Image (tube, rainbow, N blue to C red):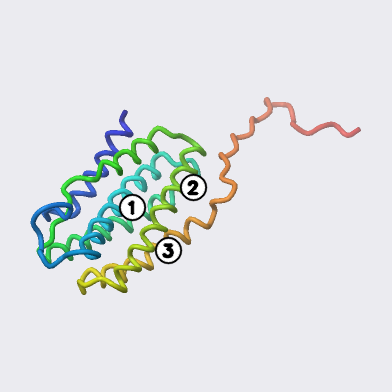
Amino acid sequence: MRFIRSTASALFLAASLVGTSAWAHGEGGNAALKGIDQQFLTEAYDHSTEQLAIGELATRQGMSDHVKKVGAQIVTDETEALKKLSKVAEKNGLRLPKAPPAQDMATVARLTKLEGKQFDDAFLAQVRARDNHALTTFQQESKHGKSDDLKTYASEELPVIRGQLDQLKTGVTNVQPKPAPRAQPPKGTTDKQPPK
């Protein structure tokens, strides 16, 4: 139960990183922001808030050092991404969500229930899927967006997303639990076999 509360807190912390910016999913904001830019703003925010929450979860719940490192890097990357996105939104009079999407909460809740290798595998798969989707979304915005600020933001974040995907490739194969420490033989004995 503590994991669920702290992970939900991480999602709301992600929302608070964008400050008092308002809501991109609904009314208000810049009327000129339409189509691909509006969709991108929403998807970029959703991507970063979910990645931040599951990255934070991986730092606590991951079994392998690799997963913990990936999680920590994601927390760093997405915290910075949300700060930048908030500045872009504020500069342009745009609104960002005040709460994470329900789908992201469901993903985090699902991951929270997993342990060990099962958690590590599910976490890595989720990050890979989200980053692959984000890569396409951010490339589209950087090429076809109408807002110069959002195009710049997307272009600056593309290397970060690629870096996360590259980090997933290292150390992912054959994730095994750490071996238990070897029991020491009682004093006065040796674990060596006598010669035959």
Q: Residue 161: x, y in percent?
A: 38, 62
Mark 3, Cα crowd under 10 Å, few <14 / some 14-19 / many 20+, is: some
- Mark 1–mark 3 Cα distance, whole angstroms, equals 13 Å
Tell me if 111 is positioned left or right of 49 in this view. Answer: right
| Residue drawn where x is 23% and y is 45% of the image | 100
Dot 2 lies on which element? helix
Where is 32 relative to 174, above or below?
below
Query: Do tag 2 and tag 1 residues touch (Cβ < 8 Å)?
Result: no
Question: 192 or 71: nearer the eye?
Answer: 71
Who comes first in sequence, dot 1 or dot 3?
1
Q: Which residue in the structure is indicated by mark 2?
A: 65
Q: Which residue in the structure is indicated by mark 3?
A: 163
- Which residue reaches farthest right? 196
Disc 2 residue type (three-letter): Asp
- Mark 2–mark 1 Cα distance, whole angstroms, equals 15 Å
Q: Residue 164: x, y in percent?
A: 42, 59
Q: Give the number of the mark in front: 3 or 2.
A: 3
Who comes first in sequence, dot 2 or dot 1?
2
- Mark 3–mark 2 Cα distance, whole angstroms, equals 18 Å
| Residue drawn where x is 44% and y is 34% of the image | 114
Mark 1, Cα crowd under 10 Å, few <14 / some 14-19 / many 20+, is: many
Dot 3 lies on which element? helix
Q: Residue 24: x, y in percent?
A: 16, 55
Who comes first in sequence, dot 3 or dot 2?
2
